[in-house]
Amino acid sequence: MAIIAGLALAVSAPVAAQTMEQALSRAYSANPTLNAQRAALRAINENVPQALSGYRPRINASGDIGASITESDTPAMPRTGAPHGSNTLRLNPRGVGLSVDQNIFDGGKTRNSVSQAESQVLGGRAQLLNTEQNVLLDAATSYMNVLRDTAILNLNRNNVEVLEEQLRQTRDRFQVGEVTRTDVAQAEARLSSAQSQAILAEANLKTSIARYRQNVGAEPKRLAPGRPVENLLPRNLPAALNAALTNHPAIIAALHGVDAAELQVKVSEADLYPTLGVRGTVAQRYDNQMFGDRRASASAVATLTIPIYEGGQVYSRTRQAKEIAGQRRIEVDTSRDTVRAAVVSAWGGLEAAKAQITAAQAQVQAAETALAGVREEAKVGQRTTLDVLNAQQELVSARSTLVTAQRDRVVASYAVLSATGRLSGRTLKLKTERYDERKHYEQVKGLLWGTQTPSGR
């Protein structure tokens, strides 16, 4: 069944109705949760140029200026005939300098930091795809909830109108003595119950509309019937499980988390290894020892640093990194178990919804036939007013069950697609501008300076 027929009957969809694809496209472009995750990925991208900076030189310029006064007093020397003398030396020592520090060897810390940053980027991309799945699933669920609750509200309102007519007819029959006061009271009670159900259905619709506004970013107006996406699903449950355990972004993100954690162990261990660097300096000094002097200097020094003992801090950080790596490995198993459970649950929900639709359609047909028969029998006195009221209520319940089952089928199809890791704007072929998660990475990876982001902020 391509079109959700029960919803189409309950909700008249005009030509200009908003479609599921349009709602999902808007959510893909404007949902704040998804946009926040995209911003988080852009922040993660900056880890790569930060790590690459370890290969590059550090250049610093310096300058200083000051004043000094030196007073000297020389006593007279009678034996040599040197007279008493005094002198005051006023200088303005100043200078400029330039230093360049270049790392030669740091125990592999920079190399492993770059690899770690790249793993974090890949993990961030997988996490973004997982967030995209959740946002699209929430949007599709909200869309179908609005349709379902609109249909149920219409059913309940129609039921109120039918029961109002039923009550009017019962009162007329009571006036001519065909029924008793009990029949009138039963019709009044059933009408009050129907009015209460209509009020509850209206409240449920308002809640669904609020959720729709939250997930899609706009008010729902004239929604078209929803469609399942079963043509995008695997053929059977084993194939769905295999696809999910291989491609689900939550599992991929967890695996990249393991890579990043294992590389952190190597980054921490690098602080135990010797480091080799070169420092070059150029300086120009004025008035350093006497007024008007000038001195230039330049140097290049290679420095080898061998750590011997640092108080145990590096050893502790390394052990800590190993424990975190172990935690990340366990989290991969947790992700696999979670994904497996989600696939089985969603697949079971889809199969159940299909079976419920078949049963509910048969139930509606039988209830319609039963109501028509009971009404005819009531006209000749073979059925009571209560029989008619019960048959009417059974028909309303059957139609509500059918509407709910059809909603569940659409939502379950999207849930299966999400559980297998394939619910995305690309898979659904949404007609909106695609977010390219690689574009920002390529823009910032090789940047050497500048504080503005590629977007101009």
Image (spheres, rainbow, N blue to C red):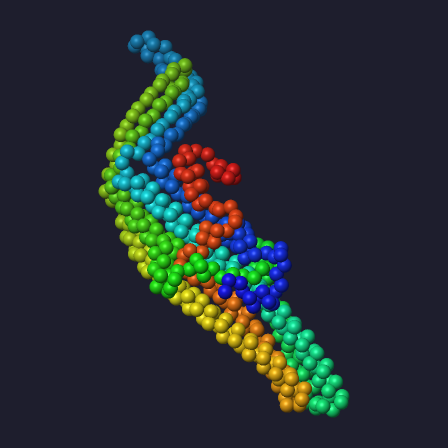
Front position in the image: 178 or 350: 178
Front position in the image: 240 or 268: 240
Residue 312 vs residue 390: left or right?
left
Which residue appears at 70% of the width and 81% of the height? 167
Front position in the image: 288 or 415: 415
Determine whether 255 is above or below 107 in the image. below
Front position in the image: 24 or 225: 225
Residue 25 rendering spot, x and y as whole percentages: 53, 52
Considering every residue shown, the one lying at the far right of the view is 175
Residue 435 rendering spot, x and y as whole percentages: 48, 46
Residue 285 vs residue 406: left or right?
left
Residue 201 rendering spot, x and y as whole percentages: 61, 70
Determine whether 233 is above or below 273 in the image. below
Residue 328 rendering spot, x and y as whole percentages: 33, 56
Which residue appears at 56% of the width and 76% of the height? 365
- Visible in this render: residue 88? yes
Which residue appears at 38% of the width and 41% of the height? 48
Determine whether 206 is above or below 283 in the image. below
